[in-house]
Image (cartoon, rainbow, N blue to C red):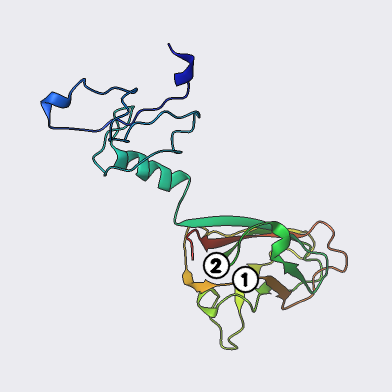
Amino acid sequence: MDASNVGYVPIVEESTDESSVGSFDPLDNSESDISQELLTSNVGVMYRYQGQQQRLMDERKAQEHIAFRNKYFTPEIMRHVIYVPITDASGVTVTLKDFGVDLDRVIGFKFVKGFFDTSSAPSEIKIIIPEIPYIACRKNAEHKHIVEVISVYSASHPQYYENKNLFRDIFFTPIKLSTLSISFDVNLASSPTASFMEYEITTLNVGD
């Protein structure tokens, strides 16, 4: 094997022309540039898409590869889960750029789970975030942007809560989300050191 051909990756095409079967020459420098010598192991560097029915080197059709790639590596939407410690009994303001994710095209938002010190809370806690579109909130007569209502079963013990409707999606027109001004309709314990919340933010994974 010629060492100069290390990294060479040919592109295999389907053809109905019997005369072309077995005639592929990787050293052919003719006008056809479909096959080229690559000094890399990255197949995608010189890849030229010939159509959905094109056969790849593992005999899969190109469309199968495209579907797999889009599903796992370039999906249309991305879901980001953020962890928010509750450092103040009345609420907390979160700067989302600190989490290192692109939140320019947010289309979904939901509460995932949380742990609350409810020793001073009544029978329920409402979580209010005005930056979230009302369509994704719990509808109420005051039109407050309530993203979740948590029932308190025992005021003498901390409350762990999980969203039972986590797989239900409500999408809205893409927005830019820079901060979250999270507040509660009641004050939690004065020192909620162990309290936290997790939220799932859905964004469009497409270019401008």
- The amino acid type found where label 1 is placed reads Leu
Front position in the image: 59 or 10: 10
Where, by quadrant of the figure, is residue 149 drawn? bottom right
Residue on which disc 1 sits: 177
Please state the horizontal and vertical placement of residue 142, each as a whole percent of the image. 60, 88
Front position in the image: 111 or 9: 9
Q: CA distance from mark 1 to mark 2?
A: 7 Å
Q: Is residue 64 visible?
A: yes
Q: Residue sitting at 32 percent across and 32 percent down?
A: 56
Residue on which disc 2 sits: 106
Please state the horizontal and vertical placement of residue 161, each as a whole percent of the image. 65, 59
Please state the horizontal and vertical placement of residue 176, each as a whole percent of the image. 59, 72
Q: Residue sitting at 18 percent across and 23 percent down?
A: 21
Q: Secondary structure at mark 2?
A: strand
Instruction: Note whether 197 is above or below 45 in the view shown.
Output: below
Instruction: Note whether 196 is above or below 150 in the view shown.
Output: above
- Number of residues whose C-alpha sits closer than 10 Å to that of mark 1, classed few (under 14), some (14–19) or many (20 or more): some
Q: Secondary structure at mark 1?
A: loop
Q: Residue sitting at 17 percent across and 32 percent down?
A: 15
- The amino acid type found where label 2 is placed reads Val
Please state the horizontal and vertical placement of residue 57, each as a whole percent of the image. 33, 27
CB contact under 8 Å: marks 1 and 2: yes
Image mark count: 2
The quadrant of the image that shows the N terminus is: top left
